[in-house]
Image (tube, coloured by chain):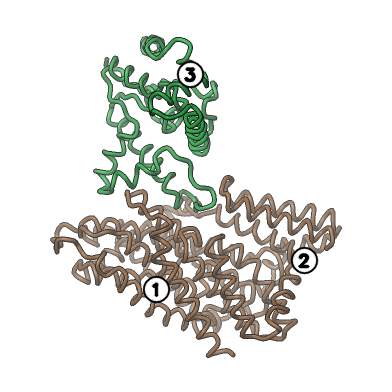
Chain colours: A green, B brown
């Protein structure tokens, strides 16, 4: 496939967004970027990946950070900017890829590339079950974890983007993975991508 | 408390909270709060048009004293301190010209070459350079260039750049306290009618002594961390040549001359009578003429957001001043200190330092200037002594944490953009003890010299 495109997948915690992203990357033979982009960034900057990973996709601490123009002492914001820079460089190098979260629905808007922005959500009960089974924790703990992760993702996204996290207006397609399952959600998204690329 | 006082206080507190939360750009916060002060405090509650005019203070720009002082400098009236705004704008234009010519990068690389690219001498030389440059140029610009070159050199020298950046940031803040070009000192100086040399002779002496102590302190705590682990020695040919930093020789020479001219004008302005507003305007015009081809670009690069931030801030503080809220604070300090100068100095310097460590030190200093004016007149203590105390407290206190001063934020950010994490723990472990040492030393020197 010669046309360059980026598939951006936003997701609620526990809805299988990561698995769907993996399937899409495999089906289109594309690289999948998520927290793994920090490996390349850390190697390039000569810094420790653990130092960067602690702040990945997290909102800045309001009380302990401050901005001066484009500068901020917030490591969360700096890691986000390093990731944005990384994605933009990959775009400028002509690479097509699938990327999970990290404001990719909006941050690549100014790049001369086709961005297909999808958002995957799920029913609360179903998500709690998946988290509980996947991590081997109680349903109560799974619910807390889910709420906390979603709150962080929303705060992270909304602080750095104009659009709201999870708002249908911010994406090209929104799918509920609980209704039809991971496999069929990936099938639908694949079909949508193919339609978009054929236009 | 009157309605006007309550409104002024509420607006001020809301402004401070919004600045801390950092959700809305700070210039919009101060401007909106400033406009609310004009409308609700002066307009609705006080019904005082004169208070609005005094706070806007536009009339002052059209007086001769604004540009040239023939006799003893006098205290500025309340409200927007246009001298600060114009001086900062002028210096920003000059700095943009110097940056365009490659002056700062050249200076850093030249200094590194001069000490044969040896890590310890670079570490010490950069601390001193940071302090000296910050005496004349805003500390944000100094750190922006110094931190960038430090990261670049550290990579080549195979050392950790973080200790160097932390030391440079501290020294930049310290250098700013030596003259009225520093962040809080410019507000204190222009508001109280002090000259560049007034600062140099007073806070300058404290800053120089403190710099010696701080260089020794950072050397002791970082001496092992700034050495390459395997004794690696860089090949000088691998390091960028300082000459390559210069984008145009003609522009470089011009920017050096303009900078020297600014330094001479600032040092001599108590004798020439030229005010900082005049110097800022003059330097900006000369820069724009010399860089005529890029004049528009230089003007576009001026940090208008910071200037707007200051304008809004002065309006809000004007509200506190006109309604007498700051007199209440001054009376409180007077009561607590029993009207004695030594406890007063201790309270001002330590409270300023602690507050400046956690909140932006510029609004804090702007608020405290009318407080020390009132204290001086009611308790009969020397205003200059309180001004130097406030300068050292706010300027040095801002060094303790990553958010205390703008230069700290820029230093941490430049490091982070290059993959080096400086968290609160690492920052405070190095800079908070240095802050305590310098504040204590400053207090001691103020006691010995002025009490």
Q: CA distance from mark 1 to mark 2?
A: 38 Å
Tell if the residue under mark 3 belongs to the same chain as the one under mark 2.
no
Label drawn at residue A12: none
Tell if the residue under mark 3 belongs to the same chain as the one under mark 1.
no
- Circles 3 and 2 in contact, beta carbons < 8 Å: no
The residue mark sitting in front, 3 or 2, is: 3
Mark 2 belongs to which subunit? Answer: B
Report helix, strand or loop for mark 2. Answer: helix
Asked if residue B25 lies left or right of residue B250, the reply is: right
Q: Where residue B309 appears, x then y in whole percent?
A: 60, 55
Residue depicted at 31% across the width and 24% down the height: A97
Report helix, strand or loop for mark 1. Answer: helix
Tell if the residue under mark 1 belongs to the same chain as the one under mark 2.
yes
Residue found at the far right of this picture: B47
Residue beneath disc 2: B322
Q: Earlier in the sequence, mark 1 or mark 2?
A: 1
Mark 3 belongs to which subunit? Answer: A
Report helix, strand or loop for mark 3. Answer: helix
Residue depicted at 25% across the width and 44% down the height: A44
Question: Is the C terminus of chain B in the top left, top right, bottom left or bottom right quadrant?
Answer: bottom right
Q: CA distance from mark 3 to mark 1?
A: 63 Å
Residue beneath disc 3: A126
Image quadrant assignment for residue B246: bottom left
Kindly tell me whether residue A103 is visible in this rendering. yes
Residue depicted at 41% across the width and 33% down the height: A102
Classed neighbour count for the residue bearing mark 2: other residues with Cα under 10 Å, few (<14), some (14–19), many (≥20): many
Kindly tell me whether residue A119 is visible in this rendering. no
Asked if residue B157 lies left or right of residue B86, the reply is: left
Asked if B224 appears above or below A111 in the picture, the reply is: below
Residue depicted at 48% across the width and 26% down the height: A139
Q: CA distance from mark 3 to mark 2?
A: 61 Å
Residue beneath disc 1: B132
């Amino acid at each position: 496939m010669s046309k360059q495109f980026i598939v951006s997948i936003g997701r609620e915690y526990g809805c299988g967004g990561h698995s769907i992203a993996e399937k899409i990357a495999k089906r289109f033979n594309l690289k999948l970027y998520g927290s793994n982009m920090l490996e390349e960034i850390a190697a390039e900057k000569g810094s420790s990946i653990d130092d960067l990973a602690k702040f990945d996709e997290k909102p800045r601490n309001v009380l302990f950070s401050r901005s001066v123009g484009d500068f901020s002492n917030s490591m969360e914001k700096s890691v986000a900017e390093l990731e944005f820079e990384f994605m933009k460089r990959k775009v400028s190098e002509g690479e097509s890829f699938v990327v999970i979260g990290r404001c990719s629905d909006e941050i690549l808007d100014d790049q001369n590339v086709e961005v297909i922005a999808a958002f995957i959500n799920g029913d609360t009960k179903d998500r709690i079950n998946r988290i509980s089974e996947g991590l081997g924790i109680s349903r109560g703990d799974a619910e807390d974890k889910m709420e906390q992760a979603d709150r962080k993702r929303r705060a992270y996204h909304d602080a750095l983007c104009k659009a709201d996290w999870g708002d249908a207006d911010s994406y090209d397609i929104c799918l509920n993975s609980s209704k039809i399952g991971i496999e069929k959600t990936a099938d639908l998204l694949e079909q949508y991508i193919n339609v978009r690329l054929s236009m | 408390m009157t309605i006007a006082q309550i409104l002024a206080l509420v607006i001020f507190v809301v402004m401070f909270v919004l600045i801390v939360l950092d959700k809305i750009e700070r210039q919009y916060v101060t401007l909106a709060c400033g406009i609310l002060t004009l409308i609700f405090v002066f307009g609705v509650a006080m019904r005082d048009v004169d208070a609005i005019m005094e706070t806007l203070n536009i009339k002052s720009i059209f007086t001769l004293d604004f540009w040239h002082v023939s006799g003893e400098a006098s205290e500025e009236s309340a409200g927007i301190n246009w001298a600060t705004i114009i001086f900062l704008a002028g210096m920003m234009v000059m700095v943009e010209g110097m940056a365009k010519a490659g002056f700062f990068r050249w200076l850093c690389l030249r200094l590194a070459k001069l000490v044969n690219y040896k890590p310890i001498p670079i570490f010490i030389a950069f601390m001193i350079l940071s302090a000296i440059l910050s005496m004349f140029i805003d500390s944000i610009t100094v750190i922006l260039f110094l931190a960038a070159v430090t990261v670049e050199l550290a990579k080549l020298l195979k050392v950790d750049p973080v200790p160097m950046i932390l030391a440079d940031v501290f020294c930049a803040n310290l250098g700013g306290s030596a003259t009225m070009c520093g962040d809080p000192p410019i507000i204190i100086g222009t508001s109280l009618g002090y000259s560049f040399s007034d600062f140099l002779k007073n806070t300058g002496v404290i800053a120089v002594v403190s710099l010696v102590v701080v260089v020794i302190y950072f050397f002791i705590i970082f001496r092992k961390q700034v050495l390459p682990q395997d004794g690696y020695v860089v090949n000088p040919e691998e390091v960028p040549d300082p000459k390559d930093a210069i984008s145009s020789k003609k522009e470089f020479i011009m920017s050096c001359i303009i900078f020297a001219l600014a330094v001479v004008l600032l040092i001599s302005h108590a004798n020439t009578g030229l005010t900082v507003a005049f110097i800022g305007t003059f330097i900006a015009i000369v820069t724009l003429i010399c860089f005529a081809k890029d004049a528009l670009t230089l003007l576009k690069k001026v940090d208008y957001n910071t200037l707007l931030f200051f304008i809004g801030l002065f309006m809000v503080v004007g509200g506190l001043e006109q309604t007498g809220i700051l007199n209440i604070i001054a009376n409180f300090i007077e009561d607590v200190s029993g009207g004695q100068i030594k406890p007063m100095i201790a309270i001002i310097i330590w409270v300023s330092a602690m507050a400046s460590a956690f909140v932006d030190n510029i609004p804090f200093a702007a608020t405290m200037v009318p407080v020390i004016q009132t204290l001086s007149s009611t308790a009969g203590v020397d205003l200059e002594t309180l001004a130097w105390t406030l300068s050292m407290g706010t300027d040095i206190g801002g060094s303790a944490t990553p958010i205390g001063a703008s230069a700290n934020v820029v230093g941490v950010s430049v490091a982070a953009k290059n993959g080096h994490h400086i968290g609160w723990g690492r920052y405070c472990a190095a800079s908070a003890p240095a802050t305590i040492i310098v504040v204590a030393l400053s207090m001691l020197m103020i006691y010995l010299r002025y009490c």
